[in-house]
Amino acid sequence: MRIATFNANSIRMRLPVILPWLTEHSPDVLAVQETKVQDSDFPVGPFAELGYHCVFKGQKSYNGVALISREPLADVRSGFNWDDAVHSPRLIWGRMGSVWIINTYVPQGRDRESEHYAGKLQWLRDFHSMLQREFTSDQLIVWLGDLNVAPESMDVYDPKGLDGHVCFNAELTELFNAVCAWGFHDVFRHHRPNPGEFSYFDYRGATIQRNHGWRIDHILGTRAMLTRSQDAWIDLEPRKRAEPKPSDHTFMCADFDV
């Protein structure tokens, strides 16, 4: 099973990037964040033409999550509760066979002194509570998406200069590790233990050419998934291309023997 994640920064704008990538790499599931489209306007047709099914929760111009899969997903839910319209555009999950796939777009936080950062921390706490309520850590579960967390110094290009950022600070790492302690392991880092591999590059300042990036996109798995993982990697090619205009993120992908 091949599972991938991609923050599209507008799924409709990024169709010329996503569709060829699906054709070339044939993932069983692609989790997309920042679709930035209300549900009635989600571009289902182009994915259906490639043989993919789509489930999604979005809103106009902001946020939005989707799972694009070879087979229809079962038991699809979004948000922290059944009627959770507030958080649904940031959290959607479903099951392919015995594997649960949880796609999240964690709030960025804006500024550490703001209510947005406090909301980010609370979001992660609420997600932790949801895990404890809905799942057990011995299940086959993949948690992936744009988590807006760079948990280690090797996950940013300038750990000294960026220390204290809303996506890279000791408080956030401690909370993130507490959530992961429920039962998640870093599948990407398991296969790629060396620094210098990033999934996000700011549009400004030729960051992709200088490898000035962040690893804030993640593929995490329970122990049962980690032991079945075969490889994980970041595909930089879509981010390097000037045309069609790339997202500021690129694809992260992992293979599992399930």
Image (cartoon, helix red, strand yellow):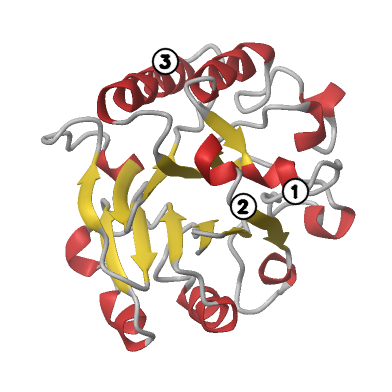
What residue did someone put label 2 on?
Answer: 229
* Above/below status of 196 relative to 158: below
Q: Secondary structure at mark 2?
A: strand
Q: Position of residue 182 (x, y in %)?
A: 47, 21
Q: Residue at x 61, y 72 (%)?
A: 245
Residue 116 numbered tag? none
Q: Position of residue 19 (x, y in %)?
A: 48, 80
Alpha carbon of mark 2 to alpha carbon of mark 3: how far?
38 Å
Q: Nearer the viewer, residue 2 or 201?
A: 2
What residue did someone put label 3 on?
Answer: 115
Q: Nearer the viewer, mark 2 or mark 3?
A: 2
Kind of residue at badge 3: Glu
Relative side of 162 to 25, left or right: right
Q: Secondary structure at mark 1?
A: helix
Residue 232 appearing in the image:
yes
Alpha carbon of mark 1 to alpha carbon of mark 2: how far?
9 Å
When asked about the image quadrant of residue 111, the answer is top right
What residue did someone put label 1 on?
Answer: 191
Kind of residue at badge 2: Ser
* Precedes in sequence: disc 1 or disc 2: 1
